Amino acid sequence: MEVPCVRAAREDGETVRELLAERALLDHDHEITVADGRIFIPVTDDEEVSDEYTVVTHDAPARETQVMPADVLGFEPTYERLGDVVLVDEDDEGRAERIAAAVMDSALPVKTVLNRASKVTGEFRTREWDHLAGDGARTVHREYGCEFALDIAEVYFSPRLATERHRVTEKIEAGERVVDMFAGVGPFAIPAAKRGADVVAVDVNPVAIEYLRENARRNGVEDRIEAIEGDVRAVAADYENWADRLVMNLPHSADEFLDAAVRLAGDDCLVHYYDIQHESDPYGPGERAIRAAADTYEVTVETRQSVRSYAPHELNVRLDVRLRA
Ligand code: SAM
Protein backbone atom coordinates (compact mmCIF):
# COMPACT_ATOMS: atom_id res chain seq x y z
CA MET A 1 0.00 0.00 0.00
CA GLU A 2 1.29 3.49 -0.86
CA VAL A 3 1.84 5.53 2.33
CA PRO A 4 3.92 8.59 3.25
CA CYS A 5 7.44 7.58 4.30
CA VAL A 6 10.60 9.39 5.32
CA ARG A 7 13.34 8.32 2.92
CA ALA A 8 16.85 8.16 4.35
CA ALA A 9 20.22 6.56 3.67
CA ARG A 10 20.18 3.03 5.04
CA GLU A 11 23.01 3.73 7.52
CA ASP A 12 21.02 6.66 9.00
CA GLY A 13 17.88 4.56 9.37
CA GLU A 14 18.05 3.88 13.13
CA THR A 15 18.82 7.51 14.02
CA VAL A 16 15.97 8.80 11.87
CA ARG A 17 13.58 6.16 13.22
CA GLU A 18 14.41 7.16 16.81
CA LEU A 19 13.86 10.85 16.08
CA LEU A 20 10.52 10.12 14.46
CA ALA A 21 9.55 7.88 17.41
CA GLU A 22 10.39 10.66 19.88
CA ARG A 23 8.06 12.97 17.96
CA ALA A 24 5.37 10.24 17.88
CA LEU A 25 5.35 10.30 14.07
CA LEU A 26 6.02 6.61 13.39
CA ASP A 27 3.23 4.80 11.57
CA HIS A 28 3.12 1.47 13.38
CA ASP A 29 0.56 0.00 11.03
CA HIS A 30 3.05 -0.33 8.15
CA GLU A 31 6.44 -1.99 7.81
CA ILE A 32 9.73 -0.15 7.32
CA THR A 33 11.17 -1.19 3.95
CA VAL A 34 14.55 -0.97 2.21
CA ALA A 35 15.07 -0.46 -1.54
CA ASP A 36 18.11 0.58 -3.57
CA GLY A 37 20.21 1.20 -0.45
CA ARG A 38 17.62 3.52 1.08
CA ILE A 39 15.27 3.03 3.98
CA PHE A 40 11.58 4.04 3.89
CA ILE A 41 10.04 4.75 7.30
CA PRO A 42 6.24 5.11 7.29
CA VAL A 43 4.98 8.21 9.13
CA THR A 44 1.56 9.13 10.45
CA ASP A 45 1.60 12.80 9.42
CA ASP A 46 3.90 13.94 6.60
CA GLU A 47 3.22 17.62 7.34
CA GLU A 48 4.67 17.32 10.84
CA VAL A 49 7.95 15.88 9.59
CA SER A 50 10.75 18.44 9.77
CA ASP A 51 11.98 19.91 6.45
CA GLU A 52 15.39 18.33 6.89
CA TYR A 53 13.85 14.97 5.88
CA THR A 54 12.53 13.87 2.53
CA VAL A 55 8.99 12.55 2.57
CA VAL A 56 7.90 10.38 -0.35
CA THR A 57 4.98 8.11 -1.08
CA HIS A 58 6.19 4.53 -1.01
CA ASP A 59 4.78 1.02 -1.06
CA ALA A 60 4.85 -0.36 2.53
CA PRO A 61 3.18 -3.63 3.52
CA ALA A 62 0.70 -3.56 6.39
CA ARG A 63 2.28 -4.64 9.65
CA GLU A 64 1.03 -7.92 11.02
CA THR A 65 2.61 -7.99 14.46
CA GLN A 66 1.41 -5.78 17.28
CA VAL A 67 3.54 -2.78 18.11
CA MET A 68 5.16 -3.07 21.52
CA PRO A 69 6.83 -0.27 23.52
CA ALA A 70 10.27 -1.59 22.46
CA ASP A 71 9.29 -1.14 18.78
CA VAL A 72 8.50 2.50 19.43
CA LEU A 73 11.54 3.17 21.63
CA GLY A 74 14.21 1.10 19.91
CA PHE A 75 15.19 -0.45 23.28
CA GLU A 76 13.47 -2.83 25.69
CA PRO A 77 12.09 -0.83 28.63
CA THR A 78 11.48 -2.42 32.04
CA TYR A 79 7.93 -2.21 33.28
CA GLU A 80 5.31 -4.20 35.15
CA ARG A 81 1.69 -4.58 34.15
CA LEU A 82 -1.07 -4.31 36.70
CA GLY A 83 -4.39 -4.65 34.91
CA ASP A 84 -4.53 -1.68 32.54
CA VAL A 85 -1.93 0.23 34.56
CA VAL A 86 1.78 0.10 33.68
CA LEU A 87 4.34 0.61 36.46
CA VAL A 88 7.84 1.84 35.77
CA ASP A 89 10.77 2.59 38.04
CA GLU A 90 12.82 5.30 36.34
CA ASP A 91 14.93 8.01 38.00
CA ASP A 92 15.49 9.94 34.77
CA GLU A 93 12.34 11.99 34.16
CA GLY A 94 12.92 12.33 30.40
CA ARG A 95 13.42 8.60 29.96
CA ALA A 96 10.35 7.89 32.11
CA GLU A 97 8.24 10.17 29.91
CA ARG A 98 9.56 8.60 26.70
CA ILE A 99 8.70 5.13 28.00
CA ALA A 100 5.22 6.28 29.05
CA ALA A 101 4.59 7.80 25.61
CA ALA A 102 5.76 4.58 23.93
CA VAL A 103 3.55 2.44 26.16
CA MET A 104 0.52 4.60 25.37
CA ASP A 105 1.43 4.51 21.68
CA SER A 106 1.82 0.73 21.62
CA ALA A 107 -0.79 -1.98 21.21
CA LEU A 108 -0.84 -2.63 24.98
CA PRO A 109 -4.32 -2.05 26.45
CA VAL A 110 -3.14 0.57 28.96
CA LYS A 111 -4.94 3.57 30.43
CA THR A 112 -2.38 4.81 32.97
CA VAL A 113 1.40 4.81 33.37
CA LEU A 114 2.87 5.40 36.84
CA ASN A 115 6.45 5.93 37.95
CA ARG A 116 7.63 4.94 41.44
CA ALA A 117 8.09 8.10 43.49
CA SER A 118 8.97 6.55 46.86
CA LYS A 119 9.86 3.32 48.57
CA VAL A 120 7.16 1.19 50.18
CA THR A 121 6.59 2.86 53.53
CA GLY A 122 4.37 3.02 56.60
CA GLU A 123 2.03 0.60 58.24
CA PHE A 124 -0.03 0.11 55.06
CA ARG A 125 3.13 -0.63 53.00
CA THR A 126 2.10 1.73 50.20
CA ARG A 127 4.23 3.96 48.00
CA GLU A 128 3.82 7.25 46.17
CA TRP A 129 3.51 7.35 42.39
CA ASP A 130 3.99 9.99 39.71
CA HIS A 131 1.42 9.96 36.93
CA LEU A 132 3.21 9.84 33.57
CA ALA A 133 0.09 9.19 31.50
CA GLY A 134 -3.61 8.90 32.25
CA ASP A 135 -5.05 9.46 35.69
CA GLY A 136 -6.33 7.40 38.59
CA ALA A 137 -4.64 4.24 39.78
CA ARG A 138 -7.60 1.90 40.16
CA THR A 139 -7.56 -1.19 38.02
CA VAL A 140 -8.57 -4.83 37.88
CA HIS A 141 -5.61 -7.20 37.75
CA ARG A 142 -5.90 -10.88 36.81
CA GLU A 143 -3.60 -13.67 37.93
CA TYR A 144 -4.03 -17.45 37.96
CA GLY A 145 -7.75 -17.22 37.27
CA CYS A 146 -8.53 -14.66 40.00
CA GLU A 147 -9.52 -10.99 39.62
CA PHE A 148 -8.21 -8.31 41.95
CA ALA A 149 -9.63 -4.79 41.95
CA LEU A 150 -7.25 -2.36 43.63
CA ASP A 151 -5.87 1.14 43.69
CA ILE A 152 -2.09 0.91 43.80
CA ALA A 153 -1.83 4.37 45.38
CA GLU A 154 -3.95 3.21 48.35
CA VAL A 155 -2.96 -0.41 48.97
CA TYR A 156 0.03 -2.73 48.72
CA PHE A 157 0.16 -5.08 45.73
CA SER A 158 3.03 -6.57 43.75
CA PRO A 159 2.28 -8.31 40.44
CA ARG A 160 5.84 -9.72 40.55
CA LEU A 161 4.91 -12.07 43.37
CA ALA A 162 2.21 -13.92 41.42
CA THR A 163 4.26 -17.11 41.00
CA GLU A 164 5.27 -17.09 44.65
CA ARG A 165 1.64 -16.71 45.78
CA HIS A 166 0.59 -19.52 43.47
CA ARG A 167 3.32 -21.80 44.87
CA VAL A 168 1.79 -21.37 48.32
CA THR A 169 -1.90 -21.35 47.52
CA GLU A 170 -1.89 -24.34 45.15
CA LYS A 171 -1.07 -26.60 48.13
CA ILE A 172 -4.15 -25.54 50.11
CA GLU A 173 -6.85 -28.17 50.49
CA ALA A 174 -10.62 -27.86 50.79
CA GLY A 175 -11.80 -27.52 54.38
CA GLU A 176 -8.54 -26.05 55.72
CA ARG A 177 -8.80 -23.12 58.11
CA VAL A 178 -6.50 -20.37 56.87
CA VAL A 179 -5.66 -17.03 58.48
CA ASP A 180 -4.06 -14.48 56.19
CA MET A 181 -2.65 -12.14 58.85
CA PHE A 182 -1.67 -9.30 56.46
CA ALA A 183 -4.12 -9.89 53.65
CA GLY A 184 -4.04 -6.70 51.53
CA VAL A 185 -6.61 -6.96 48.72
CA GLY A 186 -6.59 -10.75 49.00
CA PRO A 187 -4.02 -12.28 46.62
CA PHE A 188 -3.46 -15.20 49.05
CA ALA A 189 -6.88 -15.20 50.70
CA ILE A 190 -8.95 -15.37 47.52
CA PRO A 191 -7.14 -18.27 45.81
CA ALA A 192 -7.19 -20.08 49.19
CA ALA A 193 -10.97 -19.65 49.41
CA LYS A 194 -11.34 -20.73 45.78
CA ARG A 195 -9.62 -23.98 46.72
CA GLY A 196 -12.31 -24.54 49.35
CA ALA A 197 -10.55 -23.25 52.47
CA ASP A 198 -12.34 -21.26 55.18
CA VAL A 199 -10.39 -18.03 55.34
CA VAL A 200 -10.02 -15.26 57.89
CA ALA A 201 -8.30 -12.32 56.18
CA VAL A 202 -7.09 -9.41 58.31
CA ASP A 203 -5.66 -6.04 57.34
CA VAL A 204 -5.24 -2.79 59.20
CA ASN A 205 -5.72 -0.73 56.01
CA PRO A 206 -9.48 -0.04 55.63
CA VAL A 207 -9.15 0.55 51.87
CA ALA A 208 -7.44 -2.83 51.43
CA ILE A 209 -10.29 -4.52 53.33
CA GLU A 210 -12.89 -2.76 51.18
CA TYR A 211 -11.15 -4.08 48.06
CA LEU A 212 -10.77 -7.51 49.63
CA ARG A 213 -14.54 -7.68 50.18
CA GLU A 214 -15.16 -6.53 46.60
CA ASN A 215 -12.66 -9.11 45.34
CA ALA A 216 -14.28 -11.88 47.36
CA ARG A 217 -17.56 -11.04 45.58
CA ARG A 218 -15.91 -10.78 42.16
CA ASN A 219 -14.39 -14.22 42.57
CA GLY A 220 -17.52 -15.78 44.04
CA VAL A 221 -15.98 -16.68 47.43
CA GLU A 222 -17.63 -14.18 49.76
CA ASP A 223 -19.13 -17.08 51.74
CA ARG A 224 -15.70 -18.53 52.52
CA ILE A 225 -13.89 -15.33 53.58
CA GLU A 226 -14.24 -13.37 56.78
CA ALA A 227 -12.57 -10.03 55.98
CA ILE A 228 -11.61 -8.17 59.15
CA GLU A 229 -10.30 -4.62 59.34
CA GLY A 230 -7.92 -4.18 62.26
CA ASP A 231 -4.62 -5.02 63.88
CA VAL A 232 -4.17 -8.78 63.67
CA ARG A 233 -2.81 -8.79 67.25
CA ALA A 234 -6.27 -7.72 68.45
CA VAL A 235 -8.10 -10.13 66.13
CA ALA A 236 -6.03 -13.13 67.28
CA ALA A 237 -8.01 -13.45 70.53
CA ASP A 238 -11.20 -14.26 68.56
CA TYR A 239 -9.57 -17.12 66.60
CA GLU A 240 -7.37 -18.66 69.26
CA ASN A 241 -6.06 -22.15 68.39
CA TRP A 242 -8.10 -22.03 65.15
CA ALA A 243 -5.79 -22.08 62.12
CA ASP A 244 -4.43 -25.01 60.10
CA ARG A 245 -2.40 -22.54 58.06
CA LEU A 246 -1.12 -19.00 58.56
CA VAL A 247 0.16 -16.61 55.89
CA MET A 248 2.50 -13.96 57.29
CA ASN A 249 3.43 -11.67 54.42
CA LEU A 250 4.83 -8.66 56.23
CA PRO A 251 8.56 -8.98 55.61
CA HIS A 252 10.77 -6.74 57.79
CA SER A 253 8.45 -6.97 60.80
CA ALA A 254 6.70 -10.36 60.79
CA ASP A 255 8.72 -11.31 63.88
CA GLU A 256 6.76 -8.70 65.87
CA PHE A 257 3.58 -10.68 65.17
CA LEU A 258 4.76 -14.15 66.15
CA ASP A 259 2.92 -14.01 69.48
CA ALA A 260 -0.32 -13.43 67.55
CA ALA A 261 0.62 -16.25 65.15
CA VAL A 262 1.13 -18.68 68.02
CA ARG A 263 -2.26 -17.70 69.46
CA LEU A 264 -3.95 -18.31 66.11
CA ALA A 265 -2.18 -21.61 65.41
CA GLY A 266 -4.14 -24.81 65.90
CA ASP A 267 -2.54 -28.03 67.13
CA ASP A 268 -1.03 -28.76 63.71
CA CYS A 269 -0.44 -25.58 61.77
CA LEU A 270 1.73 -24.65 58.78
CA VAL A 271 3.09 -21.10 58.89
CA HIS A 272 4.25 -19.33 55.72
CA TYR A 273 6.64 -16.77 57.13
CA TYR A 274 8.08 -14.10 54.80
CA ASP A 275 11.26 -12.30 55.68
CA ILE A 276 13.90 -10.00 54.21
CA GLN A 277 17.41 -10.70 55.43
CA HIS A 278 21.06 -10.44 54.45
CA GLU A 279 22.13 -13.13 51.97
CA SER A 280 24.75 -14.41 54.44
CA ASP A 281 22.02 -15.84 56.70
CA PRO A 282 18.61 -15.33 55.05
CA TYR A 283 16.69 -17.98 57.02
CA GLY A 284 18.43 -18.00 60.43
CA PRO A 285 16.82 -14.91 62.03
CA GLY A 286 13.28 -16.00 61.09
CA GLU A 287 13.81 -19.57 62.23
CA ARG A 288 15.26 -18.48 65.57
CA ALA A 289 12.43 -15.99 66.13
CA ILE A 290 9.78 -18.65 65.38
CA ARG A 291 11.42 -21.24 67.67
CA ALA A 292 11.58 -18.68 70.48
CA ALA A 293 7.94 -17.60 70.08
CA ALA A 294 6.55 -21.13 69.62
CA ASP A 295 8.49 -22.78 72.43
CA THR A 296 5.49 -24.83 73.50
CA TYR A 297 5.27 -26.40 70.01
CA GLU A 298 7.38 -28.92 68.16
CA VAL A 299 8.78 -26.74 65.36
CA THR A 300 9.83 -28.20 61.98
CA VAL A 301 11.09 -26.11 59.06
CA GLU A 302 9.59 -27.80 55.99
CA THR A 303 10.79 -25.37 53.28
CA ARG A 304 13.38 -22.65 52.93
CA GLN A 305 12.50 -20.75 49.74
CA SER A 306 14.30 -17.79 48.22
CA VAL A 307 11.56 -15.66 46.64
CA ARG A 308 13.55 -12.86 45.00
CA SER A 309 16.48 -10.58 45.42
CA TYR A 310 15.22 -7.55 47.32
CA ALA A 311 18.25 -5.23 47.33
CA PRO A 312 21.99 -5.78 46.89
CA HIS A 313 22.90 -8.61 49.30
CA GLU A 314 19.35 -8.79 50.68
CA LEU A 315 16.92 -11.59 49.95
CA ASN A 316 13.16 -11.88 50.28
CA VAL A 317 12.63 -15.42 51.58
CA ARG A 318 9.86 -17.70 52.79
CA LEU A 319 10.03 -20.25 55.57
CA ASP A 320 7.31 -22.90 55.76
CA VAL A 321 7.27 -23.95 59.38
CA ARG A 322 5.10 -26.69 60.90
CA LEU A 323 3.97 -26.09 64.50
CA ARG A 324 2.72 -29.18 66.38
CA ALA A 325 1.31 -28.87 69.83
N1 SAM B 1 -0.66 -10.14 51.53
C1 SAM B 1 -0.85 -8.98 50.71
C2 SAM B 1 -0.14 -9.15 49.39
O1 SAM B 1 0.59 -10.10 49.21
O2 SAM B 1 -0.37 -8.32 48.49
C3 SAM B 1 -0.40 -7.70 51.41
C4 SAM B 1 1.02 -7.74 51.91
S1 SAM B 1 1.65 -6.17 52.45
C5 SAM B 1 3.37 -6.51 52.37
C6 SAM B 1 1.35 -6.16 54.16
C7 SAM B 1 -0.06 -5.76 54.58
O3 SAM B 1 -0.11 -5.85 56.00
C8 SAM B 1 -0.47 -4.37 54.21
O4 SAM B 1 -1.67 -4.43 53.47
C9 SAM B 1 -0.70 -3.66 55.57
O5 SAM B 1 -1.78 -2.76 55.55
C10 SAM B 1 -0.97 -4.84 56.48
N2 SAM B 1 -0.66 -4.64 57.90
C11 SAM B 1 0.37 -3.95 58.45
N3 SAM B 1 0.32 -4.01 59.79
C12 SAM B 1 -0.75 -4.79 60.12
C13 SAM B 1 -1.31 -5.22 61.35
N4 SAM B 1 -0.80 -4.86 62.51
N5 SAM B 1 -2.41 -6.00 61.31
C14 SAM B 1 -2.95 -6.36 60.11
N6 SAM B 1 -2.47 -5.96 58.92
C15 SAM B 1 -1.38 -5.19 58.91
Image (tube, rainbow, N blue to C red):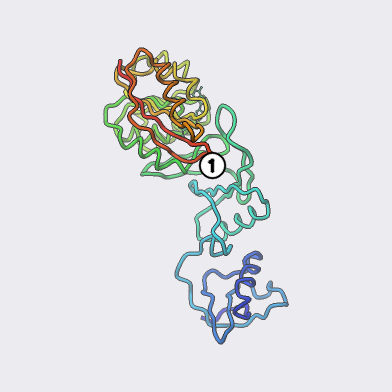
> What residue lies at 44% left-to-right and 40% top-to-bottom?
161
Question: Which residue is the extreme one toward the bottom?
Answer: 36
Report whether the residue tagged 1 is closer than 8 Å to ligand 1: no
Crowdedness near tag 1: few (<14), some (14–19) or many (≥20) residues, C-alpha within 10 Å: some
Question: Residue 186: x and y, percent?
Answer: 43, 33
Question: Which residue is the extreme one toward the left?
Answer: 174
Query: In the visual, does 291 lie left or right of 51?
Result: left
Question: Residue 133: x and y, percent?
Answer: 61, 51
Foreground residue among 312 and 147: 312
Question: Which residue is the extreme one toward the front?
Answer: 280
> What residue lies at 50% left-to-right and 38% top-to-bottom?
157
Question: Residue 159: x and y, percent?
Answer: 47, 43
Q: Quadrant of the C terminus?
A: top left
Foreground residue among 320 and 21: 320
The answer to which quarter of the image holds residue 265 is: top left
> What residue lies at 58% left-to-right and 38% top-to-bottom?
153
- Disc 1 residue type (three-letter): Arg
The answer to which quarter of the image holds residue 100 is: bottom right
Q: How many marks?
A: 1
Q: Looking at the picture, does residue 88 appear above or below residue 16?
A: above
Please tell me whether mark 1 sits on a helix, a strand or a loop.
strand
Query: In the visual, does 118 lie left or right of 173?
Result: right
Instruction: Find disc 1 in the rendering and name its residue.
Output: 138
Q: Looking at the picture, does residue 159 appear above or below residue 274?
A: below
> What residue lies at 67% left-to-right and 51% top-to-bottom?
92
Q: Looking at the picture, does residue 230 appear above or below residue 70?
A: above
Question: Residue 226: x and y, percent?
Answer: 39, 25
